[in-house]
Amino acid sequence: MARSRALCAAVMLSALAGLLASSPSALAGNCQDKLVFKSFACTIKYSDGSTSSDCWEFITNEGPSANFGFFDMETVFGAKNPFGCACDVTGSFKSPSFDNSPSAFACDDGSGYQINGKIKGHKLTGQGSDSSGDSATFSCTVGPSCG
Amino acid sequence: MLSVLFFGMFSAPVTSLAGNCQAKLVGDQMIGKAFRCTIKLSTGATMPDCWTFGTGIFSTQHFALVTAYDEFGCTCGATGSFKSPKFNSSADVIECDDDDGNQLTGTIKGKKLSAQSVNEDGSSEIFSCTPTPACG
C-alpha cells in the first residue's frame, strides 16, 4: 500500500513538473525566438533602383533594444547603428498583446532608418524606409555567420 | 495651428502618385487630413494624440506626419513582388520614421487609420485613429 502511495505521489509530482516545464512564458514563441542568434544573407532592392547584398545578425542582450536587435554588416540605407527591434502586437486594440507576434517584427536604428519584416521558415522578407522617404524591400535566407 | 506652422510656411506641396496612400492622406495639399488618435503603450498607459499629414517638411520626397509628440517622414509601402517591387505605391500602408529612434507602420481602412510603432529601445505602441477636421 505504502509503495503504491509513493508511486502515485511520484506520478503526480512528475505530471506537475511536466506541466510547469511546458507552461509558456508570456513571450514564448514570439518572433524573437526565431530570429536571435541567427544570421541572414539578404538581398535589398532600393527605391532608387539599386540592389545590394547584406548580412544581418540578430542578437539579444546587446544593442539599444531591451528585446532584441540586429547588426547590419553592410548598413541598410547607410544606417550606422545596430537596430533595436520588437515583435509586432497581436490581438485587438481593446486587448493588445505587445511584442507577441510569432512572425512579424519591426526595428529602428535611432537615426532615421526602420524596417518591418516577417519570418517564415528560413526566409525573412519585408520592407524598410528612412525619414526622407527612401524605401527598400528585402529578401533574406538563413545563412552562415556574418563574421 | 501647429500644423499650419509646420506645413504652411514651407515649400510647395509634393505631388502624390495616383491612388497611393499619400493621395488619400494629403492629396495635393500642403496640409492634409487630421486624425484624433488613442495610443496604447506597451507599458500599459493610454493617452490621446492628434495627427496631421502634410507635405513640405521633413520628408522632402513624399509626405510627413506631425503628431502631438513627434514628427515623422513617411512614404507609402511597396507593392508588387520582390522581383518587381513598386515603391511608394500602396493605397493603404504608410511607413514612417522620426530620425530619433521611432518608426511607425499604419494601415488606412475606410476612414479609419490604425498603426503600430516600434522604438529603438524595444518598446512599442498601437494607435487607433478617426478623422477630425483639424488638430487645434
Image: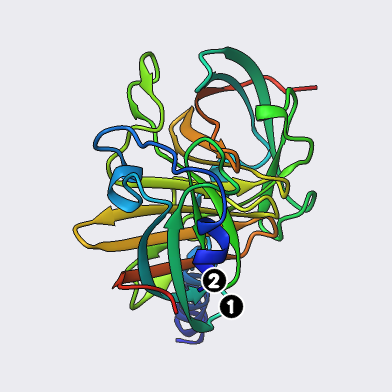
Q: Which residue is mark 1?
A: B43
Note whether A83 is above or below B65 in the view shown: above
Q: Nearer the viewer, residue A39 or B85?
A: B85
Give the crowd class for mark 2: few <14, some 14-19, many >=20 residues within 10 Å. Answer: few
Residue B69 horizontal side relative to residue B54, left or right:
right
- Element at badge 2? helix
Q: Is residue A26 visible?
A: no
Marks 1/2: CA–CA distance: 28 Å
Q: Chain of mark 1?
A: B
Question: Which residue is at 38% across, 13% downward?
Answer: B83
Q: Is residue B8 left or right of residue A112?
A: left
Q: Which residue is mark 2?
A: B2
Residue positioned 66% across, 28% down in the render: A77
Quarter of image, res B100: bottom right
To which quarter of the image does residue A79 belong? top right
Kindly indicate whether the residues beneath marks 1 and 2 are on one polypeptide chain. yes
Q: What amino acid does circle 1 point to? A: Thr
